[in-house]
Amino acid sequence: MMVFESADLTAASFSAALFGLVATSILLLLGTAWVGQRWKVTVTLCACAAVVGAGAMFEGREAWTTGSVPILYHYAGWIISMPLQVLALYFFANAAGRQRIGLFWRLVVAAVLMVFVRYLGEAQLMHAALAFLIGLAFWLYILGELFFGRMDTAVRESDHDAIRRGYFWLRLIVMVGWAIYPLGNFIMSFGSFIDGGGISVTYNVADFLNRMTFGVAVLATAIMATRHSQAQAAGDNEEQRS
Amino acid sequence: MMVFESADLTAASFSAALFGLVATSILLLLGTAWVGQRWKVTVTLCACAAVVGAGAMFEGREAWTTGSVPILYHYAGWIISMPLQVLALYFFANAAGRQRIGLFWRLVVAAVLMVFVRYLGEAQLMHAALAFLIGLAFWLYILGELFFGRMDTAVRESDHDAIRRGYFWLRLIVMVGWAIYPLGNFIMSFGSFIDGGGISVTYNVADFLNRMTFGVAVLATAIMATRHSQAQAAGDNEEQRS
Amino acid sequence: MMVFESADLTAASFSAALFGLVATSILLLLGTAWVGQRWKVTVTLCACAAVVGAGAMFEGREAWTTGSVPILYHYAGWIISMPLQVLALYFFANAAGRQRIGLFWRLVVAAVLMVFVRYLGEAQLMHAALAFLIGLAFWLYILGELFFGRMDTAVRESDHDAIRRGYFWLRLIVMVGWAIYPLGNFIMSFGSFIDGGGISVTYNVADFLNRMTFGVAVLATAIMATRHSQAQAAGDNEEQRS
Amino acid sequence: MMVFESADLTAASFSAALFGLVATSILLLLGTAWVGQRWKVTVTLCACAAVVGAGAMFEGREAWTTGSVPILYHYAGWIISMPLQVLALYFFANAAGRQRIGLFWRLVVAAVLMVFVRYLGEAQLMHAALAFLIGLAFWLYILGELFFGRMDTAVRESDHDAIRRGYFWLRLIVMVGWAIYPLGNFIMSFGSFIDGGGISVTYNVADFLNRMTFGVAVLATAIMATRHSQAQAAGDNEEQRS
Amino acid sequence: MMVFESADLTAASFSAALFGLVATSILLLLGTAWVGQRWKVTVTLCACAAVVGAGAMFEGREAWTTGSVPILYHYAGWIISMPLQVLALYFFANAAGRQRIGLFWRLVVAAVLMVFVRYLGEAQLMHAALAFLIGLAFWLYILGELFFGRMDTAVRESDHDAIRRGYFWLRLIVMVGWAIYPLGNFIMSFGSFIDGGGISVTYNVADFLNRMTFGVAVLATAIMATRHSQAQAAGDNEEQRS
């Protein structure tokens, strides 16, 4: 068995992010039982993203015992967990106000291709600069839907303040937190192709924070919105009776 | 420990399909709690197929570290998960309108033999061309039952639109998505017997998509039908009271 | 890592039976939530038998990488899962009509000794012919209780048809399906002591079918009987009100 | 990978006890959902003891592949699972009639020290004869509390017969079943310090039986007492209405 | 496979703490179902801390087979589980009386930085004495919030005695039990950087006790407070009706 050294910051970031994502997974999986029917899918998708993230962390750490983490290990997790988080946003907005099914498919395809094209670029299976630009375009498309599309309208017209605030934070994570990925993509594509450790530390911290804060924000919003609906339903009942 | 290289597309497809099937399993396993009593078995069978698929992916990936994936690793998963999916369709139709128990047994036997005969052919334990034809016949029989049998009638007479739409998509997956398996069987039987990577990539993507879309379609239909039944029951109660 | 070859039927049977038992375990574990209070223990015992079977399959497959599976690996699973299934039958009959606690203990002891004596015989820790005969006697005793004992009476007087039909099939599995074990015991005891593969294939298929059909039959009966009881209870309530 | 031989009784006992404890764990974990609120902690503690026992079995079996099982592997499990079972008895009596919190702490400390002192003696970190005697004294103290303390009074005054009978059996297991541990401690302390296999077989069978019968007795009592309480509550409701 | 020797106290402490934390995790995870809505998050956070602790124990024990445990293995667990426990205290106080969201963030940041700075110091990535002092300051800040902040006020004004007593014990654990960590930090920073075994034993016992007693205290308080609320709600209902 290989033992990591005390001062190996990359190993430390893999271990800490792994434990953090395991804790996030447990919280979100249990959390699906605390929220109302229309929030269950959203919270479950976030939980799946956390579980997948934990799995990718585990594999990446194993690879690190050999001294480098091929970018394959990062992308295998992202290609599943990123579309899951984008879909969580779709179902989040859907809970606020019915969304078209066409948007669902556009978001899935955009999120999957965004990650896949970046991978092709970094693995030198495609022209690096082209891949970077296409990946960027897909990310901007997703951001566009979040900021100017029908999802934004539905959330703004939502009857509950917690949903509006939750959507604000989730959108921020997708904009600011996800910016690390095209950035890393840019650096990797036009530099070396095997990561010496520093990039992995950044990715691990970002992966953990993006999945954890995203999931916790969704869960908190869902719990508050569920309580609000229940209080409203109780109020309606009261009224009907009297 | 063996580490996959960054540009190893086969390893990437194994990892991504594994994570995707784990996420599908979690979604479907939790989903069994969100649907009405008569949909629980259907959703559970899809969840089992996803779990088995994830297990087979995991084992196949381990085998890939040696540079080739004997077809044994694909067939061990298929012989369990394909009959499970065919049975999920039976229980799906059964929820729409009571099906005969005899059909249940015919479908089980046809689905198991379809996979088993193909395996015998590819492993050269049986004449390859004969095995291919018999496997094809079983698949066509299952398609026949789906399109022209009593299941189709029951679904068409169903009281809920979501069931009809769901059945349409599920049937399409079994027809179009499953076409990859006899095709791969044909190529493998009349070409080399050990897969150099390309076939595995195709199988992994197909396995993931077939199990995921199938499971998600079943879950979505079950949730909508459950809501419909509850709304109807609530309406009936209302009527009875007044 | 050792990779099994494509035409290795024994490895294929281990893998397929493992996946099949995992799927059975999931179905039965989830199924405990779908049945009434008095069926829960019965279904849980079948689920435990499936989990133990899956565990034994997993270990046996590992052993097979070395080229032979010592009978120890089969018996370690059987000595737990067979008594569990016999007890599932006891609780099945108990749900139909209260059984004596003495029968419970006699069945446990008979089932455990049946497997243990066979193991002693095959491992040459006891005279093989004697062990075979004693093992046979215990099996016949269990069959006797099932066919002519108080369990049969209780089931025949049961108020629900599904229970009678379920008991018929379960008894058949214990009689016909379990016949493979004394047969294998006979062949192994008077032939070689290390299995070259053929015996393991037979055992794996039998183990999977016996645990799966048994569990599914119990679950199906329990679901039908639960629905029947609920319908009856609803009918009684109706009557009481009017 | 090391494969155990067919006639290796120690390996067989490790495997069988492992499977048995896994089955017990599943039964008890599911069982926590079938019992009333005041029995849940008791059943959970028994389930935890079974899970810990299964974990210790698994590790001991791994160690056995090298030909001997250092006593460390037994004691690591016992120091957690024995206090858990003693506490299960405390909460069992607590369900019959409120117990003092001081007794809780005395029992925890006595049970932990009983196991720890025995370990110190066997590992030659303490004078063997002294450790044996102190370990014995702690066991006798626990037995004293069970037979002549306030727990016995509370159970004897309990309103339900099942509780009295359950307590009788649980006390018997702690007296007769647990007698194997000081006995083994005596033999190991004054003989060799590494176990050649025979002691492990005895320990494995005893560990499995003690955890399994204990857990099943608690679960059976809890189910019966829960039903009794529900029937009583229903009766009270009936009375109140009329 | 490496087997630990009988007298290896460090290995014994790793194994025992691992089993103890697994048992704690199971108890707390099941416990989330026994408490009222507003206690669920608190109990879940404690369960997550126990799971993470078990994971870190498992990894540390693996590392110990090589003869030393780099401090990395301790800190990877602490950086997740300590903030989780501090947050559990926040939600504990929040259940007693609404807390500001700003306090939440201050506590998270203080707890994460406390562990991270200590790690940097011990791994010689930062001046050891400075890191020790900063780590100490963050711990004192958390203690200050617990003893003199708004959380203390909210708990003291709480309507239920169990909450006040629970908070007293939890605060004590964070003050007395956590004192081992700056102490160990001090010893490690100004002595050798690789642990010969003695420090790990102390850490393992402390980790187990801190997580177990903390979790059990939270669960016990939550169960009592839930019962209190239910009794009160039932009383209110009674009053309203009459």
Image: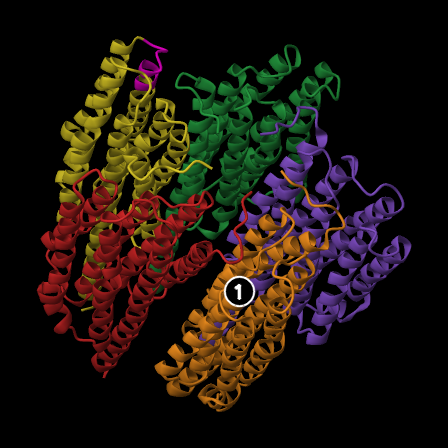
Chain colours: A red, B yellow, C green, D purple, E orange
Disc 1 sits on a residue from what chain? E
Q: Which of E181 and B37 is in front in this view?
A: E181
* Residue at 13% in and 44% down: B165
Q: In which quarter of the image is residue C127?
A: top right
Does B171 sit left or right of C161 as displayed? left
Q: Magenta span has D11? A: no
Give the amino acid type for the residue marked by disc 1 in the picture. Answer: Gln
Magenta-colored span: B118-126
Q: Position of residue C27 (x, y in %)?
A: 40, 41
Q: Position of residue D225 (x, y in %)?
A: 59, 61
Q: Which residue lies under the disc numbered 1?
A: E124
Q: Nearer the viewer, residue C104 or D202?
A: D202
Asked whether residue C26 is in view, the answer is yes
Q: Residues within 10 Å of mark 1 (few under 14, many from 20)?
A: some
The correct choice, above or below, for E108 with respect to B113 in the image is below
Asked whether residue B89 is in view, the answer is no
